[in-house]
């Protein structure tokens, strides 16, 4: 799996890029406010019901910590709190939470604190579930710019998209969650905490997906149809497998209506076949053994699009050293996967900060607009 001779950071940088090595460099997250994320739900709360929906702006803290704090404020179990997706700790993020308050008004006095503030409260008849994200809006201030920014690459990305890699935030500090996940799958450790177990298994599946996608990027066919490919609908988790790859499929792929997809490993076999399956088997030699190991965790297989096309991509140069990049991504995609196609990134959030919030989880850098 991870090469012991290189660090996880070096491994992540080695993932092939669709546009080759960028000529520009930039620093992100010099301040939390330089990485703004705004979550848009896939539905509008109806205005009545037993669940109180809260739109919260948080700065410098992770989603789980806010969820625990909200549960404490209302005197409920953390199981009564819902959210659609996790957002980066080192960011200024606007996201939604839900609180199950049957027959209760819900006192909001004293809700705000230094690290998060309430923007809106509205009732709904169902709990907020993970994945209920239409898109995430990103506004990223880039500092310490070096080298010319290739405007033609920006235009190509807006039309063609980028490889839909899971960002390095997914894997914990120096990829530690992958190591723990691999040991868990091989029976070398036991993890009782359900959330941690899910975190570790998710990290491993995401890592394998990145390897599948990296192979296709290196072969130049990550956004081209191969025999045996499964396809994902744009901005959707729905997938399908056509009987043949015909001109209609190729045209839909070219237009961005559909994307090739990769396997998120689980107990069921991959739906890919022929050429597409051969690439997956190049990455994992013994797929059958892997499925047997994952079966004991009752982890279902799924698919993820190999490509994501940022919407409303905009770049504004402020001066020689600063610029602002903004765009929208569907839930589950990472802003840093767009950035790495344009810049060599120095992420200031990777520098150890001088404090840690109490009860923060093992993954202080959560997903950049993930899910």
Image: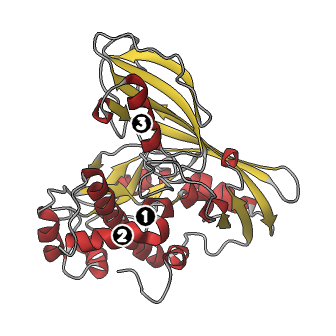
Residue underneath mark 2: 178
Whole-number angstrom distance, CA of label 3 to CA of label 2: 25 Å
Query: Position of 105 compared to 316: left or right?
Result: left
Name the element at disc 2. Answer: helix
Residue 9: x %, y % from top left: 53, 74
User: Which residue is rendered at x = 59% and y = 37% of the image?
Assistant: 115
Residue underneath mark 1: 171
User: Which residue is rendered at x = 54% and y = 79% of the image?
Assistant: 10
The number of numbered badges drawn on the structure is 3
Quick one: which residue is furthest to the right in this view? 319
Whole-number angstrom distance, CA of label 3 to CA of label 1: 21 Å
Name the element at disc 3. Answer: helix
Earlier along the polypeptide chain: callout 2 or callout 1?
Answer: 1
Residue 17: x %, y % from top left: 55, 71
Query: How many neighbours does mark 1 have within 10 angstroms: few (below 14), some (14-19), or many (20 or more)?
Result: many
User: Which residue is rendered at x = 68% and y = 71% of the image?
Assistant: 22
Task: Name the front one of labels 3 and 1.
Answer: 3
Whole-number angstrom distance, CA of label 2 to CA of label 1: 6 Å
Task: Name the front one of labels 3 and 2.
Answer: 3
Residue 44: x %, y % from top left: 43, 21
Q: Disc 3 vs disc 1: Cβ atoms closer than 8 Å?
A: no
Foreground residue, 153 or 112?
112
Up-down relation of residue 196 to residue 120 (above or below) = below
Residue underneath mark 3: 67
Q: Which mark is residue 290?
A: none
Query: How many neighbours does mark 2 have within 10 angstroms: few (below 14), some (14-19), or many (20 or more)?
Result: many
For the rendered model, the colour scheme is secondary structure
Name the element at disc 1. Answer: helix
Q: Quadrant of the C terminus?
A: top left
Question: Can the viewer see residue 181 in this picture?
Answer: yes
- Using the rendered view, name the quadrant where residue 236 is placed: top left
Q: Disc 2 vs disc 1: Cβ atoms closer than 8 Å?
A: yes
């Amino acid at each position: 799996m991870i090469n012991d001779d290189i660090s996880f950071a070096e491994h992540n940088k080695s993932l092939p890029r669709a546009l080759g090595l960028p000529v520009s460099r930039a620093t992100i997250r010099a301040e939390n406010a330089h990485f703004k994320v705004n979550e848009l739900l896939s539905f509008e709360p109806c205005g009545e019901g037993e669940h109180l929906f809260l739109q919260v702006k948080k700065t410098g803290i992770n989603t789980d910590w806010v969820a625990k704090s909200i549960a404490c404020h209302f005197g409920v179990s953390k199981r009564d709190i819902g959210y659609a997706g996790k957002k980066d700790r080192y960011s200024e993020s606007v996201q939604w939470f839900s609180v199950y308050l049957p027959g209760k008004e819900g006192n909001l006095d004293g809700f705000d604190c230094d690290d998060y503030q309430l923007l809106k409260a509205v009732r709904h008849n169902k709990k907020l579930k993970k994945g209920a994200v239409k898109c995430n809006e990103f506004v990223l201030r880039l500092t310490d710019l070096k080298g010319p920014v290739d405007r033609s690459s920006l235009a190509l990305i807006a039309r063609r998209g980028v490889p839909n890699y899971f960002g390095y935030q997914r894997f914990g500090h120096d990829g530690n969650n992958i190591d723990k996940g691999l040991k868990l799958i091989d029976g070398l450790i036991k993890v009782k905490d359900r959330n941690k177990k899910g975190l570790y298994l998710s990290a491993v599946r995401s890592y394998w997906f990145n390897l599948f996608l990296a192979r296709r990027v290196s072969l130049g066919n990550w956004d081209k149809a191969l025999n045996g490919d499964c396809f994902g609908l744009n901005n959707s988790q729905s997938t399908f497998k056509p009987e043949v790859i015909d001109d209609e499929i190729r045209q839909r792929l070219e237009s961005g209506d559909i994307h090739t997809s990769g396997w998120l490993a689980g107990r069921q076999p991959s739906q890919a076949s022929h050429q597409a399956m051969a690439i997956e088997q190049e990455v994992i030699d013994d797929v059958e053994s892997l499925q047997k190991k994952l079966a004991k965790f009752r982890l279902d297989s799924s698919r993820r699009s190999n490509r994501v096309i940022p919407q409303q991509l905009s770049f504004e140069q402020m001066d020689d050293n600063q610029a602002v990049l903004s765009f929208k991504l569907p839930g589950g995609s990472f802003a840093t996967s767009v950035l790495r196609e344009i810049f060599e990134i120095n992420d200031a959030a990777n520098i150890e900060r001088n404090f840690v919030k109490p009860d923060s989880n093992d993954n202080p850098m959560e997903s950049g607009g993930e899910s």
